[in-house]
Image: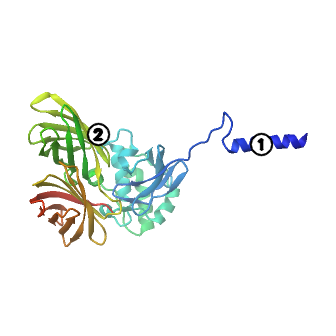
Amino acid sequence: MLKINGLIAISLFGLSACGGGSGGSTTPAPVILSGVFKDSNVTGLSYVSGAQKGITDLKGKFTYEDGKDVAFSIGKVELGSAVGQAVMTPLDLVANGQVATTEVVNRVRFLMMLDKDNTPSNGIEISKKVQTKAIDWSAVDFSAADFLGEVSSIIVDASVEDGVSHSLPDAQAAMTHLKTTLLCSFAGAYVGEYSGTETGNIALMVDPVMGNVLGSSYNLENQVSVVVNSVTEIDYDNNLEFESSEDSSKKFTGKLDSTDKLQGTWVNTSNAQSTGDFSASRLGGISTAVYRYSASFTGGDKGLYTFDVAADNKVSGTSYSVSSKKESALTGTLLNNVLKVTTADGTEIDGIVDETTLAMSGVWSNVSALEAGNFTGGGCKLN
């Protein structure tokens, strides 16, 4: 009898292990993704997301479980948490946070203050000595009216550990720094379509200097491509909304859903009954690039270029025609602020980059297609 019971037990165990039986089920393994925490790239933050935990690396990288929150901290100082995504900033850690929200601004000030070399623009590095000392710190009230008083002892500790004089930036410096970080994160080329009473293609570029959204569109019915100009720059205090308009008729009102997608609605300014929606996704963009540039081109064709510049000054990217939706890989170099690039379909691109603003301009030509024109754009430092 014992043997029979033993066999039954073994059989039942086997069914359970194989997922057999009417009630059997298995929990799917979590999907693990990676993201970057930016107030410029922040190194040295502790993070936890489900079973994922660690310290952000030199590029601000962390891992998270898809759909779960990521909590960030420095020792006992909790910065906050939010659902994980590819790029996260102090804005994400404050409910309904805006660039000027006190709790957001003070988080930015705090991180800037902890930067090891006191130069947040080249990345924020929280040293290992400060990370260790932070275990002794108490919680920080980021809504405190006297925030300097709130973190004064931490400033002293960080200065002693790093052997430099740390100080707390003022609110205006923090907001400027955060806007610059956000602009660089969202800057780039986005391509997609618009639909409704009219249909067509759209190619928009987010400018990393002012936050203007501009580019070109192509109407499938009349087969005409037109320039799209910026009307209002990205509004960081209003859901990252923007407004752009064709030279001829359509006004596009949209917002950035993430660093990889934008969408919105359009209306024909001369015929309010002609309306619809539009959406576009990021074109190109490699995470290992040191600099990322994008440009809008016009002339014999209209569209966008993306230029990712590696540490060795080699350029890779994509050329996109708004009329044909054709994408063509491009390669070249950016040396001494001179851009020389060739696309796979034979287009030669020559440009100049302003060393201070990183604004870009130049000319392009395709001899076999008998086409030529100009391009303008800009870039920012990613890593």
- Residue 111, position as x, y percentages in the image: 38, 56
Task: Estimate how packed mark 1 is, as few (under 14), some (14 to 19) or many (20 or more) residues with alpha carbons within 10 Å.
Answer: few
What number is the disc on residue 116?
A: none
Please indicate whether residue 327 sits to the left or right of residue 245 in the image: right
Residue that badge 2 annotates: 239
Is residue 357 shown to the viewer in this render? no
Please indicate whether residue 244 sits to the left or right of residue 42 in the image: left
Q: Name the residue located 21 percent from the left edge and 43 percent from the top edge.
A: 201
The three-letter amino acid code for the residue at tag 1 is: Ser
Quadrant assignment for the N terminus: top right
Residue that badge 1 annotates: 11
Distance from Cα at disc 2 to Cα at disc 1: 58 Å
Please indicate whether residue 312 sits to the left or right of residue 156 in the image: left
The three-letter amino acid code for the residue at tag 2 is: Asn
Q: Nearer the viewer, residue 221 or 319?
A: 221
Q: Name the residue located 59 percent from the left edge and 42 percent from the top edge.
A: 27
Q: Quadrant of residue 127?
A: bottom left
The numbered mark, 2 or 1, whose residue comes first in the sequence reads 1
Q: Look at the image and name its color scheme.
A: rainbow
- Residue 92, position as x, y percentages in the image: 38, 45
